[in-house]
Image (cartoon, rainbow, N blue to C red):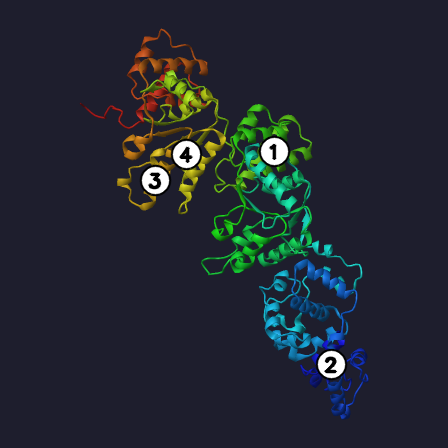
Amino acid sequence: MRVLWLLRMLVPLKGHQWLLQYDDFYGCDRVAELVGLPPTVTKAEHSDRRAALHKAWKDAEARAGQFRLRQPFARNLEKVSALFGFSPVEKQVLSLAFTAAFDPVIEPIISEIPGLSHRVAEPWAIILGLPKGATRRALAVGSRLGRADLFQMDSPLMQAVSAVQVNRPELAGVYGDSDWRPERLLKGLGRQAPPPELGLADYPHLAADVEVMVDYLRQSLAKRRKGVNILLHGMPGSGKTQLARVLGKALGAATFEVATTTSDGDASTGSRRFSMLTTLHGLLAGRRALLVFDEIDQVFADGNWFTGVRTTAERMRGWLIDQLENNPVPTIWIGNDVLSLDPAFARRFDIVLEMNAPPRAQRTEMIRRHAGQWLDEDRVRKLAQVETLSPATLRRAARVVSGTGMRAERGAQAMERLVDQSLRVQSRNPRRNPIPPLMTCDYDPSLSHASANLETIAEGLARTGEGRLCLYGPPGTGKSAFGHWLGERLGRPVLLRRASDLLGPFVGQTEENIAEAFRSAHQDGAILQIDEVDGFLGDRQRARTSWEASLVNEMLTQMESFRGVFVASTNLMQGLDPAAMRRFDAKVLFDYLRDEQAWRLLVRLCEQCGLPSPDGQAVIRGRLAATRMLTPGDFAAVARRHRFEPFADVADAVAALEAECRLKPGVATRRIGFV
């Protein structure tokens, strides 16, 4: 076959015109021998030898059907073509591409014929004896041959025969290695996934969804069903890649992960990764295997809408849709952000599962398992409050502490620091403390001046399991503390959100944060408490911008559909939207302390601060009764002050309370001057 191709290069493509410039006729003895001519020809003999060359070409064309590819090249070419499903035309183009790249005789001649460097499909068609249209389609970037990415043919210039370059060194053996096997192409395309570090039991919060996935994949593998695709998405470190490996182990299937880098360690382009996927589908078809395509953001979100650059998925839309509908190996796609995923792609996933941080109960168990040897129960509970704590973050921190050999208190402190620092890097607001202090509750509802019986409310919520409360009143009256106390009474965690937690700088981000708060509370079975709710439920008639009304609409929608306990607190009851008022089952006023409540709190304050009891001190009682607008928060502030500026006696403590109240608006103060 090489002789026929070489003669077509020299005669129809007029390669001899350039070669005859030199006394050394064909550049090497081997070329002359192949076409049946003397190894050297002088310039005086050019005319005669040109005629002989033409005759040799005519004779070769007359018996073109008798030429065959040499072994083991022909056998290996069949393996490659079968692997990728190439058509007969694509297989012939591929045979010439291999020859142009690897044949020691043909390759130098091709690269020395300038005419071949300036054409696209025509020289391929002439050399192979194929129709130009069919050859052009086979060489197109979007063709099956082009998508396989075996050779570099991404631009018109690189589609010239003389510019063929091999993209994978593993292909070199195709041309002459009798032991070459298609499995060698796995190198650089991906890897067999390592054993999972987790098991099915580590996903109790996803048990129902995981069970469906296992059953579906088991049936798909048994029936060799095509077009099976599962999408796992969610926050980084939530265990998506581990779950894919867990599924493979549970099914007894070999799990292969598409590479994200080249063999040189460089990041692979989106189109390159898609070609890897095609190759792996061909290699693994018919085997009991799963394919994992991680980091899908690299192909579904690598565009730039501002500059008009389309994503890889959009550029290869037709091919990708065909892959999703016909891939022969069940494929698990993994990504973090799928907001940019085109609906045309999204609806072709059989199962879509969002994976975020596990719920609090699961986080608690996860912390005990990975870090229980260092953390006591209080620290476990404290760490479990962090909603963004992912299994990956915890495992890495535990691995570091374990590697240092630290024990007891040193290990506990190191564990907290490592998690804290990791969460700060991951946080959108690194200045905020990722690990909040453990909320302990010594709240006594009888010491809150509420307009309703708080014990009765707690009993009712324990019985019904759902309710919407609005707590309003001055700051420091115990509204937030009541929410934590309610959580202890009902045996539920409390998910606290403040305005700063929910407000976002981008369009729609605050609404998404509100929805996420309600979703998290539902997932955890938690009481959702939102402080400063007036920022999200303000009267829409007073809204100055459309986004203010949008926040209220989102909050009202979430409140309406939430089936749990929702507690909202505000200091500005009068400004709430009327529609919001109707959605609260109970509106409870937390007012300033009554005299007997203030006295009881003073007695408790003296006990905590080690001061003499105020009992029997009428003057002290009178001063306290005369102090207006006292709240439980004032007593808490005075107790904290005592830690660094101790009071000498009860009178000093009362004076501090009086000072706290004098700073409040609306408190009558003595004016300077004569009355």
Judging from the image, what secondary structure is the residue with disc 1 in?
A: helix
Residue for badge 1: 202
Image position, residue 650 (x, y; %): 39, 14
As drawn, 373 above or below 248: above
Residue toward you, 351 or 559:
351
Q: Earlier in the sequence, mark 3 or mark 2?
A: 2
**Counting other residues with Cα less than 10 Å from the Cα at mark 3, is it few (<14), some (14-19), or many (20 or more)?**
some
Q: Earlier in the sequence, mark 4 or mark 3?
A: 4
Residues at badges 3 and 1 in contact (C-beta under 8 Å)? no
Residue for badge 3: 553
How far apart marks 1 and 2 lie (CA) works out to 71 Å
Judging from the image, what secondary structure is the residue with disc 2 in?
A: helix
Q: Nearer the viewer, mark 1 or mark 2?
A: 2
Amino acid at circle 1: Asp
Residue 571 in sight: yes
Residue for badge 2: 62
Q: Nearer the viewer, mark 3 or mark 2?
A: 2
Residue 505, quarter of picture? top left
Judging from the image, what secondary structure is the residue with disc 4 in?
A: loop
Amino acid at circle 2: Ala
Residue toward you, 649 or 373:
373
Tell which residue pokes out farthest to the left in this image. 675
Q: Earlier in the sequence, mark 4 or mark 1?
A: 1
Amino acid at circle 3: Asn
x 57%, y 24%: residue = 377
Left or right? Give the position of 528 relative to 33.
left
**Counting other residues with Cα less than 10 Å from the Cα at mark 1, is it few (<14), some (14-19), or many (20 or more)?**
some
Q: Nearer the viewer, mark 4 or mark 3?
A: 3
Residue for badge 4: 498
